[in-house]
Amino acid sequence: MYLHYWSPFFITFLLNAALAVYILRHRISRGALPLFFIVASNASWALLEAMIWMGYELETRVVLCYLQYPFIVQVPTFFLIFVLEHLGISGRFNRRRYIWLSILPVLTVTAVWTNPYHYNFYSSVSLVDSGSIKILSITYGPLFVTWSVYAYLLMLAGLSMVIMALKSSRSHYKNQYWAILTGLLVPWIFNAFYISGTFPVKHFDPTTLAYTVTVICFIWAFYRNHLFNLQPIARGQAFMNMSDGIVVLDEKQRVTDFNPAAEEIFDFLSPDMIGEGFAELCEVELADRLLEGDSRNPLHLKKRDESFYYDVRTSPIVSGKGAYVGRILSFRDVTRQKQLEDQLEYFASTDSLTGLYNRRHFSHLAEMELHRGIRYGSPLSLFMIDIDHFKQINDNFGHDMGDRIMREMVKICRKSLREADLFARWGGEEFVVLLPETGLAEAAEAAERLRESIENLEMESSSGKVTMTISIGVAELGSSGSALEDGLKEADRAMYHSKAMGRNRCSCIDSDGKFADCTKIQNAFPKRETADEITSEEM
């Protein structure tokens, strides 16, 4: 006859016990451990309640009632801890303070177990007839009221935090917070009806039965929203307003959270992408680099035809037991810094007037080309250029005109030279050109062509027409360690020979130190065969 009274509690016990086992096996996520204590305590509470309704004598029922309280007092306490842990804000509280939350529960259990000596928790306990069964009737004392007020204060504190999180959460997480809110609010509403005496069935405490709703809510959250597989990190104002983009991944590299700054960086991020694999959302190469934590160079992204650079950092997320549960990817915009670095590098390697390489950078690049040429046996030549009578141009037409003449000369030279040729301002009105894979004959031909282009240059000024000429010295580099330095000296000698011969001419110098006019280079020096030509002849 008692079956239909105690069986609902026993079913509640089984459901809570099953959920407790599940949570214990998946306790790597924040909040899982305190939730385990909530569900396990409620399971014990429901089992003892079922036994109370099995028709035992008064003394046995009272003892069972007393045995419930070590489990009852844990529920509101661990509920608050669960909220703090799950929302990721427990770090704001020293966990040693949790011990203060146990003081009143311990005192409550003590008051219950010593109730026969003071009757301040239960004023009276008796069995009353209700048809064919006897029901345990309890009149509560002042200490029970004290415990109830404390329990409800803890519940209100936790629920207010969940509500605030619900308001600021993304749409995907709203389902999780609604599950928490519903599952943990319903039992306490039923408890309020019971304590106030307004529940339809007299002396029947439905609190543990209402936890069946909690079980259903959490099971739905587990399998539908991955409540403990996809955990949001603390989503306070600091997280939402950070200028750095933050993307949170779980242990399977699925997106679990991100802030608005990350949404601005990656177009593919949206609330609908929560739970999707990060590698599937972006390019494979990009995903591999980010997941490997390669932060040697800034991440370069193109957006709306603009270049953006981000400093990428990856930090693992570990559980309290040290198990890997995910990672945090942070993206700091360093575009301005990269632009400044590029500008500094440009100014450090470039002549400000002409935009050409400066002497230092040219020497660095030329050494690299020399080593490459020696390695592959390819010829390498260079020539020195000097603007004739440049001082007179400055004196007669002004320095501004001199600068214009120099820039125009550079412009013409760039059109005449190949992209692979290294062109630099050596100093003053002197320039140097390095020609990879070019023998002396080809270099002489290029120099003469360049000289003729400059010879035809005319520019207008307030003082009349300005014309200019250049003198060029051409030399071929050897294969020694000092070949570059020696070649520069030889080309410089050849250039001064051109000036000595009347300017506006090109002169070549051979390995014996003999000079020749570049227009006669075909006869003065046999054309050097390239490696490809030698190979073709041998074949």
Image (cartoon, rainbow, N blue to C red):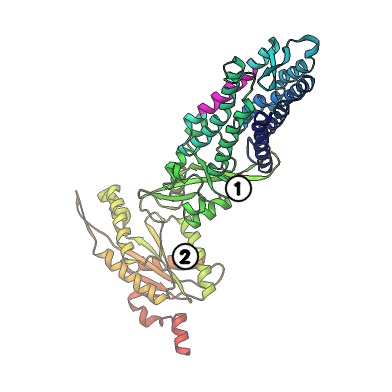
The dot on residue 238 is: none
Q: Which residues are magenta?
A: 149-164
Query: Residue 325, relative to residue 443: is it above or below?
Result: above
Secondary structure of the residue carrying tag 2 is helix
- Rendering coords of residue 252 (x, y %): 58, 50
Q: Nearer the viewer, residue 520 or 18?
A: 18
- The image shows a total of numbered marks equal to 2
Tags 1 and 2 touching, CB below 8 Å: no
Q: Is residue 445 left or right of residue 367?
A: left
Kindly identify the residue that appears in the image at 68 percent across and 43 percent down: 25
Q: Most extreme residue toward the front, as rendered?
A: 132
- Rendering coords of residue 127 (x, y %): 72, 17
Please identify the quarter of the rendering in which residue 3 is found.
top right
Secondary structure of the residue carrying tag 1 is loop
Query: Residue 363, relative to residue 278: is it above or below?
Result: below
Q: Is residue 140 left or right of residue 301?
A: right
Q: Which class describes the residues within 10 Å of circle 1: few (<14), some (14-19), or many (20+)?
A: some
Residue under circle 1?
251
Query: Residue 26, relative to residue 143: is it above or below?
Result: below
- Rendering coords of residue 340 (x, y %): 45, 44
Reply yes or no: does residue 159 show up in magenta.
Answer: yes
Q: Is residue 247 visible?
A: no
Q: Nearer the viewer, residue 129 or 178?
A: 129
Task: Give the amino acid type for the residue marked by disc 1 in the picture.
Answer: Glu
Kindly identify the residue that appears in the image at 34 percent across and 74 percent down: 445
1 or 2: tag closer to the N-terminus: 1
- The kind of secondary structure the magenta stretch mainly shows is helix
Q: Is residue 485 left or right of residue 412?
A: right
- Rendering coords of residue 178 (x, y %): 51, 32
Residue under circle 2?
488
Reply yes or no: does residue 493 show up in magenta.
Answer: no
